[in-house]
Structures are given as C-alpha cells and as structure tokens.
Amino acid sequence: DTGVSQNPRHKITKRGQNVTFRCDPISEHNRLYWYRQTLGQGPEFLTYFQNEAQLEKSRLLSDRFSAERPKGSFSTLEIQRTEQGDSAMYLCASSLGVGGDNQPQHFGDGTRLSIL
Amino acid sequence: RKEVEQDPGPFNVPEGATVAFNCTYSNSASQSFFWYRQDCRKEPKLLMSVYSSGNEDGRFTAQLNRASQYISLLIRDSKLSDSATYLCVVNARNTGNQFYFGTGTSLTVIP
C-alpha cells in the first residue's frame, strides 16, 4: 500500500505527558499537512510543509505543538505537556502542488489521541 | 465568518432517492474545490474534485457557482453504502495553500 501512513493508530496517555506522532506521506508528494478533528467537526488545519520547509502554522496552534519534516519525507507532530482538550483525531494528508495549484489531498488513517 | 459552511443535517433518505447538499464559501478568491466522504471514525477520502463547468462521476454530480460562492453535490439513486458524512473543501491561492473544510453533512440512506 503506497498511501499515507500514520502511527500509532491510537495513543492513550496521562495529562502532562509528551506525545509524538509520525506520518509517512505518498512518496512523490511534496506537500504535507497536519489536521486535528473532533467529533462533529471537519478537519481543522494545524500546519503545512512544502518539502522540508514548514510554510504555514495555524494561529490556533499553541506553543506546545511542534512539527518537523527534516528530510522532506516523513513528518512528526509532537505535543508537549498534553491537556485534556488535546484529545482528538490527528490526521496527516499529502498532496502534489506547484505554486498556487493544489491537487487533492490524500489522508492517512489518523492517530486517535485520548488524554486521561 | 467561517471559511466554509455546510448544513450538518442529518439527511435521512430512502434508498433510490436523490439528495443534494450545498456548501458556501466566504473567500471569493477560492480556486480549488473538492468533496470528500468520511465514514464514521475513518479518514476523509476524496469523492470528487469540482470543476468550473460542473462534473459528473456516475451517480454523483458536482456543481460550482462562483457568483453565489457555493458548491453542490447531487447524489442520484442513493445506495445504503452512500451513508457517510460529506465534507466540502475549499482552497484559495491568497491564503497560501491551506485547505478549509466544512463541518460535514451527515447522510443516512434508509432501506
């Protein structure tokens, strides 16, 4: 399967702990996005990479969140000092884009985070 | 005002019915439009892109109305397997490369 891969699928942790998620995009896709989704809502944009450069970050994203894509391939999303409000599905998507033209995004299965 | 707005539904329709969803967007510079389908506790999956002239894929027809800033999705001859949440997605050149999602419209097709 050459789709977008995310792991872990599920993460349960205590409040205050740090968590890290990984996303492996479709190999030829240069753009990678992280989203958060809660029940009854659409995916909410967190951050976006073009190759290894993090080009955009949501204003809603607190300093406890950080993302990297060191070699322009896989990406990690870290949440420090987790809070109960961080409980959500974290989705990664990738796409092929040139300039302002964007092809549709393809999503991974997501990582479901539960904070106890 | 939200970038993308959808009626959350739920829409409950009998098998074989025709159902239509609308989605409005606020940024007049929006240039790319998509419909995604999301099953319960699964990831969104691309259903179809929406082109300026409208486009059809089997039982699904998408339309774009730039003047009124809305897109629509029409599903004909509904199947039980069409039950899902349908997400409207919009991308605008002047907001970088962010994709904005609606909250989704829930559809249940009833036998």
Image (spheres, coloured by chain):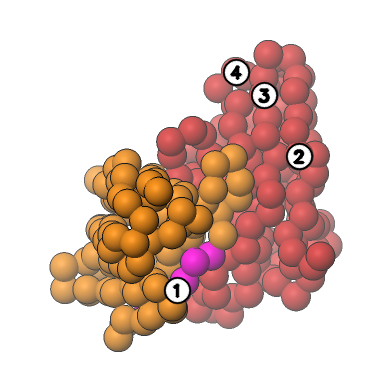
**Which color is chain B depicted in?**
orange
- Looking at the image, tell me whether mark 4 or mark 3 is earlier in sequence order: 4
SS class, disc 1: strand
SS class, disc 2: loop
Question: Which is nearer the eye, B72 or B32?
Answer: B72
Q: Which residue is mark 3?
A: A114
**Callouts 1 and 3 on one subunit:** no
Query: In whole angstroms, how far apart are the C-alphas of marks 1 and 2?
Result: 28 Å
Residue in the image at 42% along x and 54% along y: B86
Query: In whole angstroms, how far apart are the C-alphas of marks 2 and 3?
Result: 11 Å
**Span of residues in magenta:** B46-51
Q: Residues within 10 Å of mark 4 (few under 14, many from 20)?
A: some
**Which color is chain A depicted in?**
red
**Callouts 1 and 4 on one subunit:** no
Residue type at the position of mark 4: Gln
Question: Which is nearer the eye, A11 or A85?
Answer: A11
Q: Main secondary structure of the magenta part?
A: strand
Residue in the image at 48% along x and 37% along y: A60
Q: Residues within 10 Å of mark 1 (few under 14, many from 20)?
A: some
**B64 in magenta:** no
Residue type at the position of mark 2: Arg
Quarter holding the N terminus of chain A? Answer: bottom right
The chain containing the residue under callout 1 comes to B
Question: Residue B58: x and y, percent?
Answer: 43, 78
Q: Which residue is mark 2?
A: A9
Quarter where residue A51 is shown:
bottom right
- What label does residue B49 carry, if any? 1
Residue in the image at 67% along x and 45% along y: A110
Residue in the image at 58% along x and 80% along y: A98
Question: Residue B110: x and y, percent?
Answer: 38, 47
